[in-house]
Amino acid sequence: MSLKNGEIIIIGGGIVGLTIAYQIIKRGISKNIIILEKENNLGLHTSGRNSGVLHAGIYYKPGSLKSKVCIEGGKRLKAWIKDRGLKTNPCGKIIIPTKYEQDSQIDLLFERGLKNGAKVEIINNKKLKEIQPNTNSITNRALWSPNTAVVNPLEIINQLEIELKDKGVIFIKGSKIRKINKKENKIHTEDNLIIKYKYFFNCAGLQSDRVAHMCNVGKNLTILPFKGFYWKIKNNDAFDIKTNIYPVPDLSVPFLGVHFTPSGDKKNIFIGPTATVAFGRENYKFFEGLEPLMLISNLFILSKQYLMNKNKFRQYVHQQSLQAFEPFLIKSAQNLIPSIKLSDIEISEKLGIRAQLFDNKKMNLVDDFICTNDENSTHVLNAVSPAFTSSFSLADLIINSSKLNKE
């Protein structure tokens, strides 16, 4: 049994945990920080597996936490990346209606973007084809977001780790939490390590609700994991895709639909992600990370959502849940690039799992970021997109709202 002492403990070495540590040091709050990561390397889960898109702040309801931090956070992250010479693909994004009835959503997204401070423009097919020749809008209207960019998430995570180590942050890897003793301010791990803390931040992503439940926090909240498969275009010469191409989303569910995304290094064009119920929180391969009891519980929750049609949940099931199957995926892709065929794409190694929060009391999927404070801890329970984009501003928001900031 060994003992470690840290003033501030951060559980989880993803983008949110790393930027919280970065900002705590930068703001002079503390230099005595330990980051506890259950894996042997950083970036093995959500933060290292996301699409890398730096969002421009178009989708989010004005006044929401997402809208407050996305644009400022994106600017800060871009500047941080530029200062370090890391790769960025400033390719922009077009959002295209794939059905006539979606045309009014262009106006809604445009208004949201303007209110949130994003740079957006409604364009016609002539301008659309200048940006991306092999696309077309059935309503002769689309939305253009020139400030959307794409980065390599792992490159950013690795750089943050290097800089935090240089600033004296201690990383404890390969250590899973067994229990948390709130009375004694101690975290016990499965490898017989005891970490004493003054304050801790729960940034455990896919496991964040389980960590919170150890502290009797957020008992009504549960992570529902959704698996995101990606395909990629075998040869982009025939399509010459240079920008992100998204469908107009159904804003009643927290998924944006299958879209085209250039990689940060401009070498690949990815198609995806899907939004399929995962068989476990870390179920990246079929027989890997299976959690049968969790799956049964989640399917029960989702079936109730379907029957109640909460937030038009049936539309998600009918439109998006089957897109892990190639015929459904290619049909969605053809709504954006009509000439693309199944023979033009192949399954990619890129695969992520979204840590989507569900509120068991309200019986709905949580859309906005959620942070819950306990006596000596803050629990980040719904750090979904655009958490990566917003990371530095989101970190400040979490620190400002925590009880640590009020001591």
Image (cartoon, helix red, strand yellow):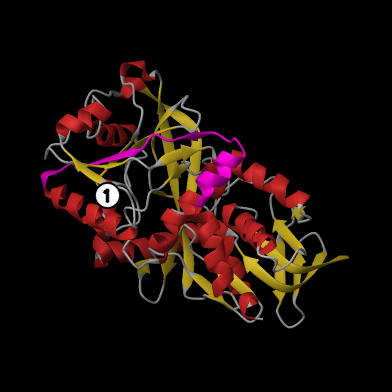
Left or right of 404 on screen, residue 74: left
4 left or right, relative to 355: right
Label 1 Cα neighbours within 10 Å, binned few <14 / some 14-19 / many ≥20: many
Q: Is residue 235 visible?
A: yes
Taking the magenta stretch, the answer to whether it contains residue 403 is no
Q: Give 325 or 271, whichever is nearer the viewer.
A: 271
Identify which residue is drawn at 80% across, 59% down: 191
Badge 1 marks a residue whose secondary structure is loop
Image-based side of 138 in relation to 177, left or right = left
In this view, 155 is above or below 28 = above
Query: Toward which corner of the image does residue 62 lie, by quadrant?
Result: bottom left
The x, y position of residue 223, in whole percent, is 48, 62
Residue 79: say if magenta: yes
Q: Give residue 47's position: percent from left, percent from top.
A: 55, 48
* Residue at 51 percent of width and 66 percent of height: 381
- What residue type is disc 1 on? Pro
Q: Position of residue 153 (x, y in %)?
A: 55, 42
Question: Is residue 283 in view?
Answer: no
Task: Find residue 7 and report its image quarter.
Answer: bottom right
Extreme residue in the right direction: 1
User: What segment is highlighted magenta in the picture?
Assistant: 76-100
Judging depth in this view, the residue of 256 and 123 nearest the camera is 123
Vertical position of residue 142 compared to residue 293: above or below: above
For the N terminus, the image quarter is: bottom right
Please provide percent x and percent y for residue 236.
37, 20
The answer to which of 336 and 119 lies nearer the viewer is 119
When asked about the image quadrant of residue 306, the answer is bottom left
Residue assigned mark 1: 249
Quarter occupied by the C terminus: bottom right
